Image (cartoon, rainbow, N blue to C red):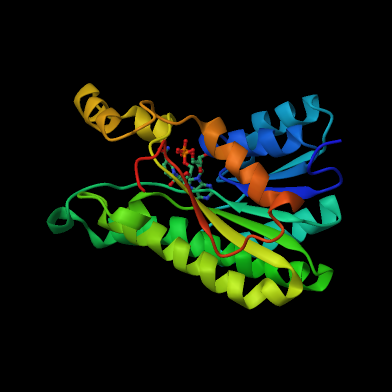
Amino acid sequence: MGLLEHKVALVTGAGRGIGRAIALKLAGDGADIAAVDLKPEFCAETCDMVRAMGRRAWAYGADVASAAAVEQTVEKALADAGKVDILVNNAGITKDTLLMRMSEADWDAVLNINLKGAFLFTKALARAFVKQRSGRIVNIASVIGLVGNAGQCNYAASKAGVIGLTKSVARELASRSVTSNAIAPGFIETKMTAVLGEDVRRKLLNQIPLGRLGSAEDVANAALFLASDQAAYITGQVLTVDGGMVM
Ligand code: NAD
């Protein structure tokens, strides 16, 4: 019996990378998956993989930064799956450049997707969670939201914002047994980090006590724990999954 038998999880940015790994990990422990990405075809393959594991899956195309799209998606997911028990706010982007070169558009795009997107999905599902007196919210932040990074003002602010959102929602919804936690991954091997040069990669490795970049599965393992009943007494926390880089 898996940890998530009879649960439904909605995962944003489930088309690839960490989001896909989380969807598959939760499905592996019994959850049905509502997979959200910019276009439904982006997460169709994730859904096929979930179905091959014997679980139900639905693909939804939505821009997490659009309130109307998020509300429609949540409505459809609740109708298709009958309920949602777990929300994983994972969709995120980077638009890196130094502060003095950063355009307003670079700032807005990152804040809108990484922070407002998490707010919109949390808000859209909060009523259902409160009504059913249960719910798990897992937000994918970043260690950059804890320590900052040159060239990532927008990204760091968005992820620090996600941490503030996580803690405030934890306080608001705790009386209904809804938990809200964040995972702060360090450097994880995905398309987002594939652009890093050899030099940067070597420097990074020197700062990671465990001596390797993380895998999407390392993050998914933490998401499974926080989404499960095993984490029922944990809320408002930030779990770093970074090989010991930030401690
Ligand atoms: P990725 O780029 O591989 O995947 C992100 C997914 O989100 C894609 O499928 C993309 O289509 C989707 N997406 C982007 N914008 C969207 C939008 N507006 N609406 C809906 N979907 C959208 O990235 P990843 O590395 O898997 O990162 C996933 C999350 O983990 C992000 O929040 C990222 O900030 C965070 N993170 C990643 C790392 C890392 O090292 N890769 C480290 C810390 C945190």
Residue extending furthest top?
198
Q: Nearer the viewer, residue 30 or 154?
A: 30
Q: Quadrant of the N terminus?
A: top right
Can residue 14 be seen from the camera position used here? no
Q: Quadrant of residue 219?
A: top right
185 lies left or right of 219 = left
- Give the residue drawn at x 28%, y 54%: 148
- Residue 62 placed where, x, y %? 59, 51
- Residue 150 placed where, x, y %? 20, 50
132 over 8 or under it: above or below? below
Q: Quadrant of residue 218?
A: top right
- Give the residue drawn at x 74%, y 42%: 33
Q: Nearer the viewer, residue 154 or 176?
A: 176
- Give the residue drawn at x 57%, y 66%: 120
- Residue 39 placed where, x, y %? 58, 42
132 over 247 or under it: above or below? below
245 over 162 or under it: above or below? above
- Give the residue drawn at x 66%, y 38%: 23
Q: Nearer the viewer, residue 65 or 33?
A: 33
